[in-house]
Amino acid sequence: MTLARSKLKVHGGSRRWMLSRLSAGLAALGLGPAAGRAGTDDLKPVPLSDVARVDAAGGEGWLARDHGGRIWQVLEDGQTRQLAEGLAPEGALDVSHGRIAGRGADGRLWVRSDGAAASAVQRSAARLSPHGGLCGLPLAVIGLVDQDGQARLARFEPDAQGQWQIVARSEEAVLPDAQPVLADLDGRGDGGHLAVLAGPDRQRYPHAVLGDDIEATRVLWLERHSLKPLRSLQLQAPEVFEDRQLRPWRLPDGRAGLVTMRSGPLGAQLAVVAASRQEAVSLQVAMAGPPIGTRNRWMSAASVDPASEELWAVHTPHIGGVLHRYVARGGQLAAERVASGLSNHRLDARDLDVTARIGRWLLLPSQNWRQLQIFDLQGRAVVSSLDLQATVQQLVAAPGGRAVAVLTSRGLSIYRRP
């Protein structure tokens, strides 16, 4: 749409009013520039240097790691306190059940209990897989270990001396960088069991945008103590799960579901895995969205809310980045294009969702990763843009959902929605 200046027969305040209305209308459709631009004054710098990674804390604020392996507590008002050292600067961190668990600088499981002295860190004898995720349980930590050149899920428990030992392993190989998650897929009300992407394969779908060329072909649901299979799903060739994690979400029929990405000859599509109602040991793809349409085109889920009826995903985050809203309709997921010029994943990165949510607002990087776009989930439009003058590395919402840690190439800051 264009408006020739020579034919615009209004002047002064009327002309400015008409242009502002046109700009607002385009922004509401996600087609034009943001409705407002925020300044860097909206970011509160955190006085930490050399921050490598940020994770949400168990209570308030965040946990920040530097490249030297030190870990800091960061409160929402910007106050910081060093907690411990000896962690690998990047990789999985689990904060639950009164402890922090991560991968130590020596590759072993590293565990610190709340309130313990900085030196009171417990470790495992076994080494963790370098890129595997962690899942905390009341009496254990679930991690990934290498066995005969393949990754296995392992249950770690502390012995009488406080050293964490492996007490169970999965029989099947899992994705080497999988993120295990607790899910109550049978509705037992027993705290849930472990869902994980498995069946690693290098041949079916050579796309390799998530850090390596290995993709999952199975979903396993394993008993949390023995790691024996309860249910499973096997995809038929040439399809794969082009993902690292499974995101809990409630299906319209009340079943607990797991959101992931299924890819094949027509590219990626949003899929929801759930327990089969016909077979007691099977999982199924209970609902799916339309495929993106072209092989080797991917989409990235954007902060899936387990309690929401909507799902959000960025299609082709490396090429144009189009945000879509998904809702259940007719037994499938219907997709609606709502905004473009966004991203939430870097090519070849293992961090899948550089997105954060504060109430009704979703925060995502721009395509060049130097602006922070504020998207109104109710109005379905970008409402403001924050110029960062640096490259976004992470966006992490605080547990209370009131603030977001913004890690850029220039350092760590805190953003609160005005």
Image (tube, rainbow, N blue to C red):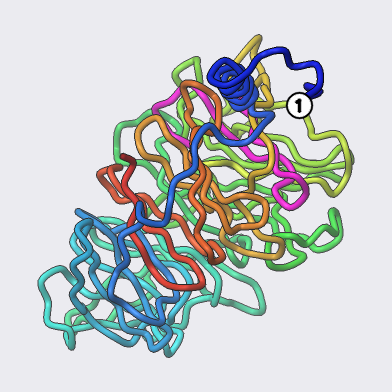
Counting every numbered tag in the picture gives 1
Q: Residue at x 63, y 61 (%)?
A: 175
Does dot 1 land on a helix, a strand or a loop? loop
Q: Please say if 25 is above or below 225.
A: above
Left or right of residue 71, residue 288 in this image: right
Residue 381 on image: x %, y %:
55, 28
Residue 30 on image: x %, y %:
64, 28
Residue 283 on image: x %, y %:
60, 34
Stretch in magenta = 303-326
Q: Residue at x 23, y 78 (%)?
A: 159
Q: Residues within 10 Å of mark 1 (few under 14, many from 20)?
A: some
Residue 310 is a magenta residue: yes
Visible residue check, residue 2:
no
Q: Residue at x 43, y 51 (%)?
A: 39
- Name the one closer to the observer, 158 or 367: 367
Visible residue check, residue 190:
yes
- Name the one closer to the observer, 170 or 403: 403
Q: Which residue is mark 1?
A: 290
